[in-house]
Image (tube, rainbow, N blue to C red):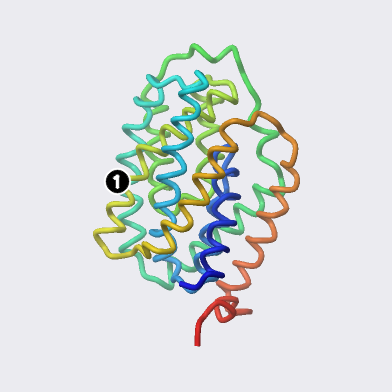
């Protein structure tokens, strides 16, 4: 890994940590960068989990310090989500590489639609549901979200926010705090599956993680909307470049390979 690769991973990691902490979809950037730097889709999927794990440790600590983290519901919802993430990770490591590459391209295109449409408009605070108790339907919902998270993780923050606000009754700030708590629990076990199957590039993973941790610190202390439009367009551009790469139109990875 060159100094340029390290700089790219740190820089993109800051953006990823910031985006993932405030909303979701940051993994579109990290997975894209890892693949553009030469990792296969499956290896990138595993390596990305290191940054996710560390960014959420930082985010949870910061939200807890600011007194906006309600742990009880978050811990309860983490149970089905974590079980689902293990299943999703096993699906990801066992799936045929070519099939996974096509699945990733399709999911990226779906996330492009979500990003352009701006799902935040659909995720509005409903304070009358704040005290709503959990039921079996919510546990089932978070189990399936966990499966998706373990499989690829891209955009899972949007799904968690929607489920936490519309289903579990949280307002936006607390929903973000509980979201990162749930991801904190789901990530280590899914990461362990990738480690067991030797699908981690540790140098790239920890370089990316350094950046995501910095981004998470900044994002968890911000409650502003400024820059949301810019972030969306960054994601759009990155998704389009990655799709071009995955469909074999242009091999961007060649620009980062060493002779």
Give the answer, above or below, for where 69 lies relative to 39.
above
Residue at left offset 32%, top offset 62%? 93
Foreground residue, 65 or 244? 65
Give the answer, above or below, for where 57 lies relative to 99.
above
Residue 171, quarter of picture: top right
Q: Position of residue 220 (x, y in %)?
A: 56, 33
Q: Where is residue 2 in the image (x, y as percent from the top left)?
A: 50, 73
- Say few, some or many: other residues with alpha carbon within 10 Å of mark 1 (under 14 / 14 to 19 / 20 or more): some
Q: Where is residue 204 in the image (x, y as percent from the top left)?
A: 44, 63
Residue at left offset 26%, top offset 63%? 197
133 horizontally vs 106: left or right: left
Give the answer, above or below, for where 171 lies relative to 187.
above
Residue 222, quarter of picture: top right
For label 1, the SS is: helix
Q: Mark 1 points at which residue?
A: 189
Give the answer, above or below, for where 202 lies relative to 252.
above
65 horizontally vs 234: left or right: left
Foreground residue, 76 or 217? 217
Q: Position of residue 254 (x, y in %)?
A: 56, 81
Residue at left offset 46%, top offset 24%? 64
Residue 133, quarter of picture: top left
């Amino acid at each position: 890994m060159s100094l340029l690769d390290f700089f790219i991973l740190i820089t993109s990691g800051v953006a990823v940590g910031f985006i993932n902490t405030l909303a979701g979809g940051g993994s579109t950037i990290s997975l894209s960068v890892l693949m553009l730097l030469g990792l296969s889709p499956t290896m990138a999927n595993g390596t990305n989990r290191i940054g996710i794990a560390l960014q959420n440790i930082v985010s949870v600590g910061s939200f807890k310090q600011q007194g906006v983290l309600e742990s009880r519901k978050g811990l309860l919802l983490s149970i089905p989500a974590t079980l689902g993430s293990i299943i999703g990770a096993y699906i990801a490591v066992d799936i045929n590489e070519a099939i996974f590459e096509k699945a990733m391209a399709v999911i990226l295109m779906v996330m492009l639609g979500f990003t352009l449409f701006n799902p935040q408009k659909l995720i509005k605070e409903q304070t009358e549901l704040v005290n709503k108790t959990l039921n079996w339907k919510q546990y089932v919902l978070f189990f399936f979200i966990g499966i998706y998270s373990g499989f690829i993780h891209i955009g899972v923050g949007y799904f968690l926010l929607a489920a936490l606000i519309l289903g579990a009754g949280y307002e936006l700030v607390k929903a973000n705090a509980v979201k990162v708590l749930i991801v904190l629990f789901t990530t280590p076990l899914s990461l362990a599956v990738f480690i067991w199957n030797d699908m981690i590039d540790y140098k790239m993973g920890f370089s990316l993680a350094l950046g995501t941790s910095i981004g998470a610190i900044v994002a968890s202390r911000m409650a502003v909307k400024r820059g949301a439009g810019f972030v969306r367009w960054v994601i759009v551009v990155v998704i389009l470049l990655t799709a071009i790469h995955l469909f074999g139109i242009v091999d961007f990875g060649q620009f980062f390979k060493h002779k």
